[in-house]
Image (cartoon, rainbow, N blue to C red):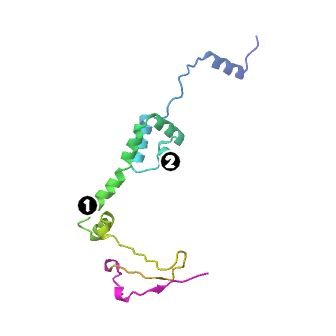
Amino acid sequence: MEEKTSQQKATDARKSVSYEYVGRHTVMTNEIVLKLEQSFALDATVEEACSYAKISRSAFYVWLEKNPEFKDRIDDLRQNPILAARKTVVDNLGSNPKIAFKYLERKKKDEFALKQEIEHSGNVGERVTEITMLVPKEYKDEQDTTTRADLKAVPSVQSD
């Protein structure tokens, strides 16, 4: 009787094992979902979250399509850093007037934001040749003794 080669033995071994096809298994274990959640709680991008969880972006998107409720979970988790930053700002309003003023500039723009008024009196397409800039006194450098009355139109540099 002729002895079988190692390749023939391997082929016979594969033939003797029966496989039942049950479809592709998902890569989304509880551990991977937890890593994704941890990443999104830090406002990570999908690319960053998938890298941390060690899965492909395509696998993530396939899984997300089958689990659309996770999209809402991601959106909720991504709000955490924003809420933490907002809490820090609000907690420090009383102790830091600059933070308080900046907060008001953004939240109550009509009352506290620096306003920029631009008036154009020439033709459309005409070059601007001078700009007048007024600096509110709360933003004036302590070393700067310039007052509003001292500010004049400053000719701009033209280059052709």
Q: Nearer the viewer, residue 130 or 81?
A: 130
Q: Amino acid at mark 1?
A: Asp
Q: Nearer the viewer, residue 4 or 84?
A: 84
Q: Is residue 25 left or right of residue 101?
A: right
Element class at badge 1 = helix
Q: Nearer the viewer, residue 76 or 110?
A: 110
Q: Is residue 144 left or right of residue 11?
A: left
Q: Is residue 102 visible?
A: no
Q: Amino acid at mark 2?
A: Glu
Quick check: is 157 in the magenta stretch? yes
Name the residue beneath numbered marker 2.
47
Instruction: In the displayed orientation, state which residue is furthest to the left.
Output: 94
Q: Earlier in the sequence, mark 2 or mark 1?
A: 2
Neighbour tally class for label 2: few under 14, some 14-19, many 20 plus, Cα within 10 Å = few
Name the residue beneath numbered marker 1.
91
Q: Nearer the viewer, residue 75 or 109?
A: 109
Taking the spot 36% from the left edge, 73% from the top edge, the residue there is: 115
Q: Could you tell me residue 133's position as x and y percent?
A: 41, 81
Taking the spot 64% from the left edge, 20% from the top edge, the residue there is: 14
Residue span colored magenta: 137-160
* Occupied quadrant, residue 108: bottom left
Quick check: is 104 in the magenta stretch? no
Q: Could you tell me residue 152's position as x and y percent?
A: 41, 87
Instruction: In the displayed orientation, state which residue is furthest to the bottom.
Output: 150
